[in-house]
Image (cartoon, grey):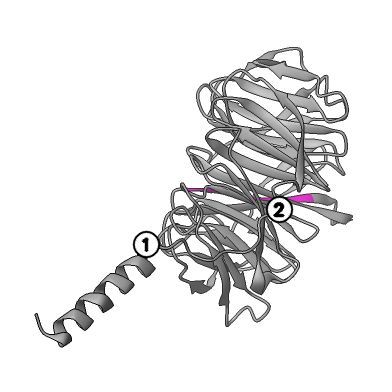
């Protein structure tokens, strides 16, 4: 065998070894989070949100629950009383969003009623159904709400929700639903998995099409930005979109120039990234069989892994409340972790 062939073989072996090497990732501090509690629940945690004192859990095939974040006491609602004394049954409650300033929960139930229930959460341990949203509420994938600091023409909350390719938007006066804005529904260029609101825009996680931006006042699509993977959910903070992008893990997009979004960072997680949240420079990602990932995003263009949590099993959803991480697990209930 010639010297040239030996050199070629050696080169092939070096390339093969390099290809199998683990990618060099950011430092992981395995002591950064401390488990506070594990709370068993009935049903599958499919969405999480919080107010100042309680975590709210949508339980597919289990109804709804609230968990006191001081005592971790669970209050379970397989059904709920309405103001008129009637009873609303819950079973397939898949999505919810909490308006803590105005003591409202927007809860999507698809099995019996196919609507968004509006719930009075003044007492999180004694909830009441007070109204509902119907029309376009089948197969909802996400609900986003935004509370006004001061009422705007009597309205205190704006609501966006998506199903299939349809995006809907409306306003809420704190005693009844004002209905869908006449401009809506509008169609997205692909299936919408998640929505987010700010002052002027509605952002959509449009699965194979990536990030889609709508002008809120007109419903017009003003831009798209492709990302790796399949965009499932997103959160927008301080001019950056953090996207849970299934096989694409966490994708970070700079949207400070709304007409020129730029991908600035990514982290390919194990499992399929399905949910994401942000609080005070920390990003959490639910990644299915890969567990939950927690990142330092104080510099969004240089995200750093803080910790990967796998003890929860298959992770469906995550929520950050100040310095507490809440994880909804497919098989093991709801976990609470303290950032150290």
Q: Residue at x 52, y 41 (%)?
A: 140
| Residue 71 placement (x, y as % from top left) | 86, 23
Q: Which residues are magenta?
A: 157-163
In the image, residue 162 lies in the stretch drawn in magenta: yes
Residue 29's tag is: 2
Label 1 crowding class (10 Å Cα cut-off): few <14, some 14-19, many 20+?
A: few
Where residue 1 sits, quadrant-wise, is bottom left
For label 2, the SS is loop
x then y, percent, for residue 291 = 56, 41
Where does the image place residue 68, in percent across and percent down from the top left? 83, 26
Q: In the picture provided, is 334 more to the left or to the right than 53?
A: left
Q: Nearer the viewer, residue 20 or 72?
A: 20
**Image spot of residue 245 (x, y percent):** 49, 57
Residue name at image x 25 percent, y 74 percent: 12
Whether residue 264 is situated above or below residue 207 in the rendered picture: below
Question: Which residue position holds label 1?
Answer: 20
Q: Is residue 298 placed above or below 287 in the rendered structure? A: below
Foreground residue, 311 or 208? 311
Which residue sits at x=65%, y=20%?
Answer: 41
Q: Alpha carbon of mark 2 to alpha carbon of mark 1: how far?
A: 24 Å
């Amino acid at each position: 065998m010639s010297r040239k062939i030996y050199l070629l073989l050696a080169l092939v072996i070096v390339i093969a070894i390099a290809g199998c090497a683990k990618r060099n990732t950011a430092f992981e501090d395995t002591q950064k989070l401390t488990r506070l509690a594990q709370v068993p629940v009935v049903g599958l945690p499919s969405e999480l949100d919080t107010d100042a004192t309680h975590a709210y859990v949508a339980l597919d095939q289990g109804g709804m629950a609230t968990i006191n974040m001081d005592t971790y006491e669970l209050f379970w609602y397989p059904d709920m009383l309405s103001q008129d004394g009637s009873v609303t049954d819950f079973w397939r409650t898949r999505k919810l969003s909490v308006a803590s300033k105005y003591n409202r929960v927007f809860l999507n139930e698809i099995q019996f009623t196919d609507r968004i229930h509006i719930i009075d959460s003044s007492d999180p341990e004694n909830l009441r159904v007070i109204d509902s949203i119907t029309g376009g509420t089948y197969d909802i994938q996400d609900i986003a709400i935004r509370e006004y600091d001061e009422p705007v023409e009597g309205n205190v909350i704006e609501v966006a929700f998506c199903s299939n390719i349809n995006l809907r938007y409306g306003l809420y006066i704190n005693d009844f639903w004002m209905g869908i804005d006449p401009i809506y529904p509008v169609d997205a260029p692909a299936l919408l998995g998640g929505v987010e609101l700010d002052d002027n825009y509605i952002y959509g996680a449009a699965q194979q099409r990536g990030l889609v931006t709508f002008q809120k006042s007109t419903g017009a699509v003003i831009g798209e930005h492709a990302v790796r993977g399949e965009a499932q959910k997103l959160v927008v903070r301080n001019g950056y979109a953090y996207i849970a992008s299934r096989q694409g893990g966490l994708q970070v997009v700079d949207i400070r120039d709304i007409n020129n979004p730029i991908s600035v960072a990514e982290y390919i997680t194990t499992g399929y990234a399905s949910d994401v949240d942000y609080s005070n420079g920390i990003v959490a990602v639910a990644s299915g069989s890969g567990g939950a990932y927690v990142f330092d995003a104080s510099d969004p263009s240089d995200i750093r892994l803080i910790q990967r949590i796998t003890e929860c099993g298959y992770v469906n959803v995550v929520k950050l409340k100040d310095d507490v991480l809440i994880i909804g697990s497919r098989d093991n209930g709801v976990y609470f972790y303290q950032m150290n």
